[in-house]
Amino acid sequence: MAFEHVQAAVDAKLKKLGIKLKCKVWHLSEGESWSCSKICSRSHIHVIHLNPQDVKSRMLARQNLQHLLLHEYGHVFFCKYVRKKETAKLKELFGDVDKSYRRDMKKKFIEPDFISTYAQVHPEDNFCEVFAVYVSFCGDMQKIKKFLKQKKKSDKVLKQILWIDKFIKKR
């Protein structure tokens, strides 16, 4: 699927959930995908640097370009909306998102309390992986529960999904 179609599908899913994130997406041919927020002329510009080769990572919850893009959108959503409203529940469910963003890239193993192995590298990535799954299924809890059951995930991951669902709906 061409990247433009993937981006259009992602934008449609975000819109269906009432999420508006203005981002510039730049393609990378080398290096890791990442996102950032820049301040230009008094406004924030969110930029996603996307390397389609990252889809090959077996650490992601879903191995496709849509998931990779949604993960990076998750960082933008987190910075724009969630970080401002951190709660004890957020910390309990996802980990200490206040700790400096230094990813722990040591070998990870599949754990039922994490939606993916990549979710274990930093609490913010934990949030982004769960966010990406939630949006990829357009918040359809039946499909999400089926996915979690297939992946043998714990109730903690379901609670993370439910927290994101509630957060998005009351925003």
Image: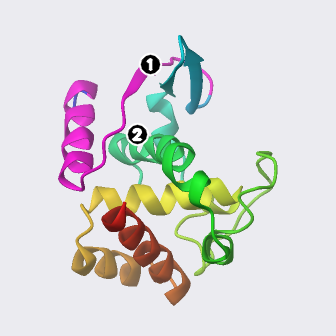
Q: Farthest residue toward the top?
A: 41
Q: CA distance from mark 1 to mark 2?
A: 11 Å
Mark 1 and 2 residues: CB-CB less than 8 Å, in contact?
no
- Magenta span contains residue 14: yes
Q: Position of residue 4 (x, y in %)?
A: 23, 25
Q: Nearer the viewer, residue 121 or 131?
A: 131
- Type of amino acid at the residue the image marks with label 2: Leu
The mark nearer the N terminus, 1 or 2, is: 1
Q: Residues within 10 Å of mark 1 (few under 14, many from 20)?
A: few
**Is 139 on the left or on the right of 152, as rendered?**
left
Q: Farthest residue toward the front?
A: 42
Query: Could you tell me if residue 67 is visible in this image?
Result: yes
Q: Which residue is mark 2?
A: 69
> What's drawn in magenta, residue-wise?
3-31
Residue 57's place in the image compared with 129, above or below, is above
Q: What's the mark number on residue 27?
A: 1
